[in-house]
Image (cartoon, rainbow, N blue to C red):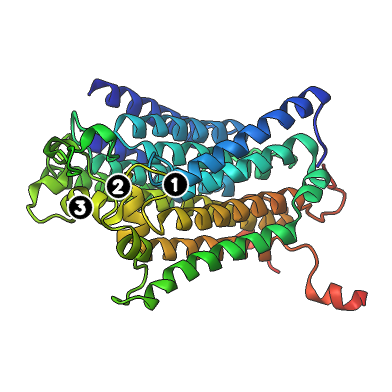
Amino acid sequence: MWIFYVLLLFMVIACIIAVQTDNLLSSIICVGAVGAIGSLMFLLLYAPDIAITQVVVEVLALVVMLRVTISRDITFITGDREFFGTVTSIVIILIIFLAGIEVFRTLPAFGVPVFSQFSNAASQTYITEGLTKTGAANIVAAIILDYRGYDTLGEAAVLFTSIIGATVILRKETRKQVESAR
Amino acid sequence: MPYALCFLLFIIGLLCAVVKKNMVKIIIGLAIMEYAVNLFLIMLGYRAGGTAPIISPTDINPEGALVPEFTLSSVDPLPQALVLTSIVIGLGTLALMVSICIRTYEKYGTFDITQIRRLQG
Amino acid sequence: MKGMTVIVKTVSSWTKVLIFLFGIYIVLFGHLTPGGGFAGGVILACSYVLLLLAYGREFAEKNLSLGTASKLDCAGSLLFAAIALTGFLYGSASFFYNFIQQEYLAGHNTAFKLVSAGIIPLANIAIGLKVGASLFMIVILLSAFRPEMSGREKE
């Protein structure tokens, strides 16, 4: 159990470095470190599917974010926004943090899953009947493609839309240029 | 207690997205918030001393039914299914944010959002 | 976007094939071992991103052009929707009805084999195709974008 505390502490330190440093390149590298330690934590939390997905997605996210900082004038814009807005936001966020800590007392302790408190939880049905009803040995794959396939359709739609949006924004010639070239 | 540290990670990302004035720092804050939320969802389903929700050939009887120790010791598979799609959607929205950021830099010449508010046209 | 030195080009021409093969394995065995369509699709996109980074953008566009990647993306989505809609042809008409498993394979003991679990491997292949093609398109577009600013033509 102590390994979780050590890894979470590393993540918090890397996150603070990523937020506070002035050099954009080193802050992006620290975000990569947060993602890599997160993937290790997923492996220790018995979620191997998520660990594989997290590590490859984080590599591609680094490649995409590096495109913004390389080959530009890296103007060292430091400092925060105007003073009064900053202080107000920090106070409000501190209040949210303290309220959130109180909410965590209602959850069961770490190490006891939430679904074991209820007798008719959906996860129990998925675990006991997953192999015989769907034939898949990987219960997570059976959930996302058989029991909850509609959510996967929604996810495919969201990914498609965001890629279309990025394609349209990064277009090089507009319609007027194409028509005037004819 | 690990829940509190994960929430602290989320709060640091939120502070970065609200307080900083460099556009790339705002994107970094949003990415850190996504990592923290995914980690919290997986931590909700963790069972100490459990096994991953993948059935191997040693977990079934000779008749083909599931051994009861597996259902007593497996972790929750439902949050893992939610987080799996959430991670890939996070990558798609990050690509969209980065493309908006590059276009704004091309139009205004700076990453500073206070400057962008005051320029006209 | 220019390429890199000869050493990097040679080594990456061997490793990108291995990464592509690994991505296909993760997609195909998604119903037996950890992985699935999403992780496998991102790995497939990563192999093409390696090609882009090592050889430069013109070579990568000759290998898999933007039009082809866009068509593969649409084909993956339409295949996924078609698999979901064929559930309506069978008795208990519902969206995403696992018709192969319930009608043809139920009763046979096909656990832990590659050909099992009905529509799940087919849907994994469709999702892997879609996610891989989308992410490759976005990285190509981000590397091809050159801002037209006066006097700032950087490579």
Do we see residue B101 in this rendering? Answer: no
In the rendered image, the quadrant that contains the C terminus of chain C is top right
Query: What is the quadrant of residue A161 in the picture?
Result: bottom right
Element class at badge 1 = loop
Residue ranking furthest to the front = C108
Question: What residue sits right under mark 1 in the picture?
Answer: C36
> Residue C49: percent from the left, percent from the top?
67, 42
Question: What residue sits right under mark 2 in the picture?
Answer: A139
Q: Nearer the viewer, residue A70 or C151?
A: A70
Taking the image as shown, residue A55 lies to the left or right of residue C66, namely left
> Residue A100: percent from the left, percent from the top?
22, 47
Q: Residue at x 55, y 41 (%)?
A: C23
Tell me the distance, in whole angstroms, between the alpha carbons under discs 1 and 3: 20 Å
Q: Residue at x 52, y 60 (%)?
A: A159
Indicate the amino acid at tag 1.
Gly
* Chain letter of disc 3 in the image: A
Question: What residue sits right under mark 3 in the picture?
Answer: A129
Marks 3,2: beta carbons within 8 A: no
Tell me the distance, in whole angstroms, between the alpha carbons under discs 2 and 1: 11 Å
In the rendered image, the quadrant that contains the N terminus of chain C is top right
